[in-house]
Image: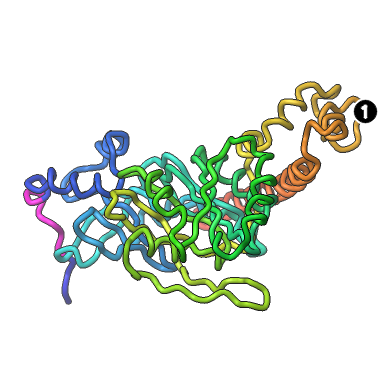
C-alpha cells in the first residue's frame, strides 16, 4: 500500500523566498505573514483556497494548484458553517507526493468574510468568499436593475467592511434616455458608492473599470445569473477562458454559468473571485451593515422619543416624520424595515438552533459519562 510522501523541510526553507513571491501574487501581505508565523513549522506551508467544491478544495501557493482535503483534527473542531474554509481563505497546509495533494490544517484569521443566509430552509450561513478588498455588484440595466436588491448587497458587503463598487452592465441594450433615468434613480445614494456603466459588447467603460483595479488586491464578482459576470471576467482576462450561456429571452433570466466559487489572477495583478448567480439574498447578524447602508435613517432614529422605537407606529418617531417630510426616501425606509425584520427573524431562529445543538451536545456528553460509569 502506498503512503503519502511529505515535502522535505530543507527544500521548503530553500524555496521560502520563491514561495513568498508566489503567495504575494495571490494577495499575501505582511498582515497575513504575521498571522502565519505561529503555524509555519517543519513541512507546514501557507496556501490560498482558489476553488471550493462540495467535498474538497483547490489551494495554491502561487506556483502549484493542488486539490486539498480537511484534516481529521480540523473536521473535529468544526462547530458552524463559518468554520469551514471558503474561496479566498489563507490556510495552513501540508503538501504531499510532489504537490499531487494537500491537507488543510488551519484557517488564518480572516480580514473579511462575505456570507449570506443559506438559500435553503435551514437558517445557516452560506460562505461566499473571504479576505475580499472590493466587491463588484453587477446589475444589468436592461432588466435586472433593482434598487432594493442593490441595498441588500450593500448591507451584506458593508457588514464585512468591504468596499462596494456597482457595475451597471449591458448598457448597449438600453437607450440614452433609459440610462439617464437610472442615473436619476441612483442619486439616492448621494455619491456614497462608485457606479461604473459598462458594455462587454461595445467595450464602453471597460478601460475605466480596469483603471480602478489595484495590483494584489482581491475583488469579488456578485450578482444574479445572466448579468454578465463571467463575460466580464473573460474580458478582463483577455481570453475566452470560462464558458458563458445565453439569457432566456422570455423572462431575461440567466442560467448558472459559474457553478463554483473560483479565484483567478489577472495579468494586471488583481485577483478576481467569480461566484454563482444569486437568486435569493437573505441576511442576518447584519447590524453594522444595516446601519452603514441606511445611515440617514440611523441618524434620524437618534432623535426618536423612545430608545426602542421600531419606526413603525410610535408617536414621536423622528424617522417616520422624516419620511413624511421627504427627508428620507420612502422606498429606502420600506426596504430598511423589511431587511431589518427578516434579519431579526433569521437571527432568532439561528440562536434557537445553536441552543438546541448545545443542549443536545451536553445530553450526549452526559450519556457517554453514564455509560462509562456502568
Magenta extent: 5-11
Determine whether 298 is above or below 134 in the image: above
Q: Residue at x 49, y 40 (%)?
A: 163
Residue 150 appears at what percent x and percent y?
A: 63, 50
Q: Which residue is drawn at 62% across and 71% down?
A: 253
Query: Residue reaching furthest front?
Result: 176
Front in this rendered view, residue 312 or 200: 200
Residue 129 appears at what percent x and percent y?
A: 45, 52
Residue 11 appears at what percent x and percent y?
A: 7, 51
Residue 332 appears at what percent x and percent y?
A: 74, 42
277 left or right of 65? right
| 309 is within the stretch colored magenta | no
Q: Which residue is drawn at 46% across and 50% down?
A: 83
CA neighbours of label 1 inside 10 A, class few (<14), some (14 to 19), many (20+): few
33 left or right of 345? left
- Provide the residue designation for mark 1: 315
Front in this rendered view, residue 259 or 110: 259
Q: Which residue is drawn at 24% across and 65% down?
A: 101
Secondary structure beneath label 1: loop
- Colour scheme: rainbow
Determine whether 289 is above or below 271 in the image: above
* Figure disc tally: 1
Which quadrant would the N terminus be assigned to in this image?
bottom left
Q: Is residue 296 visible?
A: yes
Q: Can residue 38 be seen in this view?
A: no
Determine whether 256 is above or below 115 in the image: below
Front in this rendered view, residue 135 or 74: 135
Determine whether 300 is above or below 210 in the image: above
Amino acid at each position: 500500500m502506498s503512503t503519502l510522501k511529505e515535502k522535505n523541510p530543507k527544500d521548503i526553507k530553500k524555496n521560502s523566498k520563491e514561495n513568498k513571491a508566489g503567495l504575494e501574487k495571490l494577495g499575501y501581505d505582511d498582515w497575513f505573514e504575521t498571522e502565519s508565523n505561529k503555524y509555519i513549522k517543519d513541512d507546514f506551508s501557507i496556501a490560498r483556497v482558489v476553488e471550493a467544491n462540495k467535498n474538497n478544495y483547490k489551494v495554491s501557493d502561487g506556483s502549484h494548484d493542488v486539490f486539498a482535503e480537511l484534516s481529521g483534527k480540523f473536521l473535529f473542531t468544526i462547530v458552524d458553517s463559518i468554520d469551514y474554509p471558503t474561496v479566498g481563505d489563507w490556510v495552513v497546509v501540508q503538501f504531499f507526493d510532489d504537490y499531487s495533494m494537500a491537507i488543510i490544517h488551519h484557517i488564518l484569521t480572516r480580514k473579511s468574510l462575505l456570507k449570506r443566509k443559506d438559500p435553503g430552509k435551514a437558517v445557516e450561513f452560506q460562505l461566499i468568499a473571504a479576505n475580499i478588498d472590493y466587491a463588484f455588484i453587477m446589475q444589468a440595466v436592461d432588466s435586472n436593475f433593482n434598487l432594493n436588491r442593490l441595498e441588500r448587497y450593500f448591507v451584506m458587503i458593508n457588514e464585512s467592511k468591504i468596499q462596494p463598487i456597482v457595475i451597471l452592465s449591458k448598457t448597449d441594450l438600453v437607450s440614452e434616455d433609459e440610462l439617464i433615468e437610472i442615473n436619476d434613480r441612483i442619486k439616492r445614494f448621494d455619491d456614497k458608492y462608485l457606479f461604473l456603466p459598462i458594455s462587454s459588447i461595445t467595450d464602453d467603460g471597460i478601460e475605466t473599470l480596469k483603471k480602478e483595479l489595484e495590483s494584489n488586491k482581491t475583488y469579488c464578482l456578485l450578482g444574479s445569473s445572466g448579468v454578465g459576470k463571467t463575460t466580464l471576467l473573460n474580458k478582463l482576462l483577455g481570453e475566452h477562458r470560462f464558458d458563458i450561456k445565453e439569457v432566456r429571452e422570455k423572462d431575461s433570466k440567466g442560467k448558472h454559468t459559474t457553478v463554483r466559487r473560483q479565484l483567478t489572477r489577472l495579468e494586471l495583478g488583481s485577483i478576481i473571485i467569480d461566484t454563482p448567480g444569486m437568486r435569493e439574498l437573505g441576511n442576518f447578524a447584519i447590524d453594522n451593515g444595516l446601519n452603514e447602508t441606511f445611515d440617514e435613517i440611523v441618524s434620524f432614529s437618534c432623535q426618536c422619543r423612545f430608545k426602542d422605537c421600531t419606526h413603525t407606529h410610535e408617536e414621536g418617531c423622528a424617522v417616520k416624520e422624516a419620511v413624511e417630510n421627504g427627508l428620507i426616501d420612502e422606498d429606502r425606509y420600506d426596504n430598511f424595515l423589511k431587511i431589518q425584520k427578516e434579519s431579526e427573524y433569521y437571527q432568532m431562529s439561528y440562536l434557537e438552533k445553536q441552543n438546541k445543538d448545545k443542549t443536545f451536545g451536553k445530553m450526549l456528553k452526559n450519556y457517554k459519562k453514564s455509560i462509562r460509569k456502568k
